[in-house]
Amino acid sequence: SQQGEEDPQALSIQEGENATMNCSYKTSINNLQWYRQNSGRGLVHLILIRSNEREKHSGRLRVTLDTSKKSSSLLITASRAADTASYFCATEIGSVLANTGKLIFGQGTTLQVKP
Amino acid sequence: EAGVTQSPTHLIKTRGQQATLRCSPISGHTSVYWYQQALGLGLQFLLWYDEGEERNRGNFPPRFSGRQFPNYSSELNVNALELEDSALYLCASSPHRRGSTDTQYFGPGTRLTVL
């Protein structure tokens, strides 16, 4: 089964609104990453948050991590039509001294931003 | 800086044939990862190569194999193709350092269709 579970599966908002996506995972992680995928193309890396971090910002993106609840959220502020895409969280398990190289992806949230 | 490149963009094969997919990592990156994104199954980890060696393997049959060349580029070979191998195959690279976890940067993918 997938390590990451995203919620909601689909989200439709108007341009200018904020979009929040949530990700839950099951086991201890080294880090959690968020990616964007446009129309079945390659993944674009958005942000990486390490297990000892609680919040990170990058432009209009804000990511939080709660390791006690095994959950993360991605907030996109002032959304644009160009933000329309699928968003995935990915976790890497294993210890820092013994990387597995394996990212485990959630099923993704499909975001539609209407102009 | 050039990103991860993959070739070909699309590949059409018939059942039983062999497919070869290629990936060039970002300059300076020594680790290459392969993932399969099949409809309904999400993104699944296939293989991880670092400095010419296979470091980890996902839950795929042995007919999925690959290698990494001295220039760190990589090939993924799929033998005895089956219809369910139809998927988007994504390659990623990272500047792997032992004792550290790094962002994986993805290429645009190769769309493999098995008829």
Image: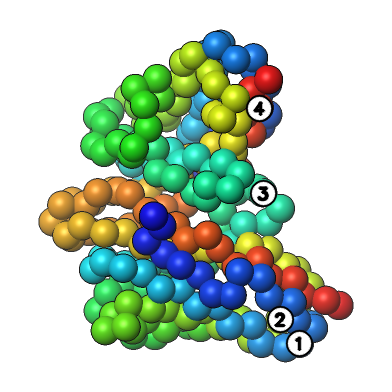
**Residue A56 in view of the camera:** no
Name the residue tied to disc 1: A16
Chain bearing tag 1 is A
Residue A62 percent across, percent down from the top left: 51, 83
Q: Mark 2 belongs to which amino acid?
A: Ser
**Residue B58 in view of the camera:** yes
Name the residue tied to disc 4: B113
Look at the numbered discs 1 and 2 and tell me whether their residues touch, using CB distance below 8 Å.
yes
Residue A92 quadrant: bottom left
- Which residue is depicted at the point 45% across and 21% down? B77
- Disc 4 and disc 2: Cα gap in Å? 35 Å
Name the residue tied to disc 2: A79
Q: Which mark is residue A40?
A: 3
- Which residue is depicted at the point 56% across and 57% down? A44
Q: Residue most toward the top?
A: B17
Q: Is residue A84 left or right of residue A90?
A: right
